[in-house]
Image: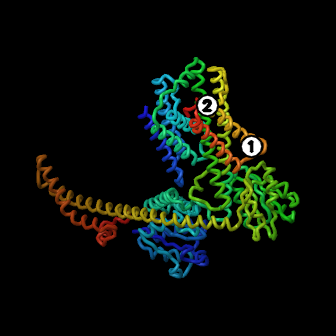
Amino acid sequence: MDVLLVAVLLFYLSSAIYAIITLTMEQPPARTNQRLRVLVAIGFAVHSASIALSWKQLGHFPVVNLKEVCSFLAGAIAAYYLIFVPRDKARALPIFVLLCSFLLILVSLLLPDEPLSLTLSSAISASPFTKVIFPIHVTMLMFSYAAFVVTVAGSAMYLLQERQLKTKHFGAAFRWMPALNTCDELSYRSLTIGFVLLTLGVLTGMMWGSQHDGRFWHNDPKEVLALVTWFVYLAMIHYRVTAGWRGRRVAWMAIGGFVAVLVTFIGARAMGGYHVFG
Amino acid sequence: MSIVLLGINHHTAPVEVREQLAFTEAELPDALQAMIQNQAAQECLIVSTCNRVEVIAETADANQLRDFVYELKRLPLNCFNSHLLQLTDAEAIKHTFRVASSLDSMIVGEPQILGQVKDAFHAAQTIGTVGHTLTRLMNRAFAVAKKVRNETGIAANAVSISYVAVELARKVFDTLDGTTVMLLGAGEMAELAAKHFITNGAKKLLIANRTYEKAQTLATEMNGEAVPFETLDKRLAEADIVLCSTGATHHLITSKQIEQVLENRRYRPIFLIDISVPRNIDPAISHLDNAFVFDIDDLEAVAEANLQERQREAERAELIVSAEAERFAASLAEGNLNQVIGVFRREVHQLATAELERTRKRLGQLTPEQEDAIQIMLNSIVNKFTHPIIKQLRESEDGHSPYLEAFREFYHQDKE
């Protein structure tokens, strides 16, 4: 499987390089975007095959340790880009997204494989229902993280450019970055999608818990942190809808929200609890 | 026969001189036809714009062509020679490429010139004064111009104030389609900028002026809506882009106003351009989120930086153009050389074959072996005879050795 993963790594890397080269061209060749998407799609297909293969070999959904989570998240980010990112507008975005996927796979390849813990194993295979709900729970959350990665990319591009427009010092990358409104829309759209997926992920987690041991809430650090993250994003959407907040303030909030995601993602591992896998 | 370019342009001559040599669109067909009919040129086309007049021709005598141009314009012979660029072959090719690529333009990289050169070529094509050589030259020039545009940034950035304003606004709004522009005051530059915004997609134009009648006049003229100055506070919220250029000596738009405007706009960004001196828009507005203010100096700084960027890119473009011009000149010369050599060999071979045919009667019936042997001998003699001469010709790289000229005379190859 690692061989397949190395192939995937190369696909994501070469698409990132293709995206960089065409971005800096005065006039990129025709159908650049379609070609890029095809390249990413092939990488994603190989990636999916490698995950399916692991699933078959291991007998359980293969996203139970950090190594596997990194790889799965990389795929989710690529898939998110293919499905949800509008076609032509933000030409600088794929670079960010693809480099993210590339790095995550690199990390995944370098991390050691940890065996499935007994507690988790029993939680997954407690009943036919938990066997089904586990992959759904994980997939929802991974895709919500992918959406938040795109949100952060949009926000970062917004902040960088906003700063240059305000200070009137235009750096080299200025020309290639999408317009402020495009960044803002992209960011907000991904934020909403990510929020919906996060909600579904948390809900499926609760359903799983209540099926497994009768409790939908365990006071697990990850659960608490996820709730905090959820409220941060809820607040952002609330102010956007009611007060029309947008621009710099929202971009900073999106970055703050992402820090909460990172803390949830990595921090919970350090704090113990049964969500230790990622 | 060579490619000749007679040119006069903003580098070589002031407008008083250029205008005397310029050809109007109506004059062009007759001028082109006259050049051909009077055998001043074999092929010709004329690019005539406000910055340049360039006669590009295939001719044997550049001086004769030049005299004929003076004659056409009813000017005394040689009167503007000091302003006139007279280039032949490689140099003429390079200049043509530079002009088409907008490297010779007043504002390097401006896009109109390529269209003007294309028009000139098509005009000459319609009248039928361009043939094989100039068609090749011009098609190559268009390809080079495209290459320069694609591979360098000479046309990438705006270098005029109003274009800079449009490009900066695009950095905020992505597209100007459907945006509303408010023009405050009647400064000429702001008006020009407003026109640029409209041609680039802005949907609505609001015009405010201290004197409402002035606003109304301008509104009729520019197809906008006049806005009474007293309602400015309210109407500002509609504007995505505000262009300001008045004679007022204080801030017409204050930070407090924009704060309110932004709230009314639900924080959709607003883009303000202040072309007035002293400034009419409070620069402190810059500190508000979603409000972007640029004054005349900001725009000029961007334009200046872009111009410098263009000039750097132009240096790269010059390299491309030089290389392409050399390649084209070489291929043209080689084409000429091969043509001459081909004709030479054919002629010698025909001579030998004719002699053989005359002798054949006396030879009687030959066996196939004998026939072959004679053919081989004949080819061998032709090759041995022509070889040192062809070698000599090929060694004259630029295709302009006295030998080549001599051969052209011998075999009358000019007409081909």
Using the image, determine if residue A180 lies above or below residue A203: below
Task: Name the one closer to the observer, B357 or B22.
Answer: B22
Left or right, B137 with reference to A224? left
Which of the image's four quarters has the C terminus of chain B? Answer: bottom left
User: Does dot 1 land on a helix, a strand or a loop?
Assistant: helix
The disc labelled 1 sits on which kind of residue? Answer: Arg
Residue depicted at x 41% and y 71%: B60
Using the image, determine if residue B283 lies above or below residue A231: below
Which of the image's four quarters has the N terminus of chain B? Answer: bottom left
Q: Which numbered circle lies on residue A240?
A: 1
**Percent from the top left, x then y, of residue B415?**
38, 64
Task: Name the one closer to the observer, B285 or A274.
Answer: A274
Answer yes or no: is residue A275 visible.
yes
Residue depicted at x 75% and y 40%: A238
Quarter where residue B355 is shown: bottom left
Task: Name the one closer to the observer, A157 or B94.
Answer: A157
Q: How many circles with numbers are drawn on the protein?
A: 2
Q: Which residue is mark 2?
A: A140
Tell me if mark 1 has few (under 14), some (14-19) or many (20+) residues whose alpha carbon lies within 10 angstroms of its own. some
Chain of the residue on which disc 1 is drawn? A
Left or right, B263 with reference to A174? right
The disc labelled 2 sits on which kind of residue? Answer: Met
Task: Name the one closer to the observer, B384 or A51.
Answer: A51
Asked whether the beta carbons under mark 1 and mark 2 sit within 8 Å of each other, the answer is: no
Left or right, B86 with reference to A211? left
Quarter where residue A4 is shown: top left
In terms of sequence position, does the residue under pointer 1 or pointer 2 come before the other? Answer: 2
Query: What is the image's colouring?
Result: rainbow
Tell me if mark 2 has few (under 14), some (14-19) or many (20+) residues whose alpha carbon lies within 10 angstroms of its own. many
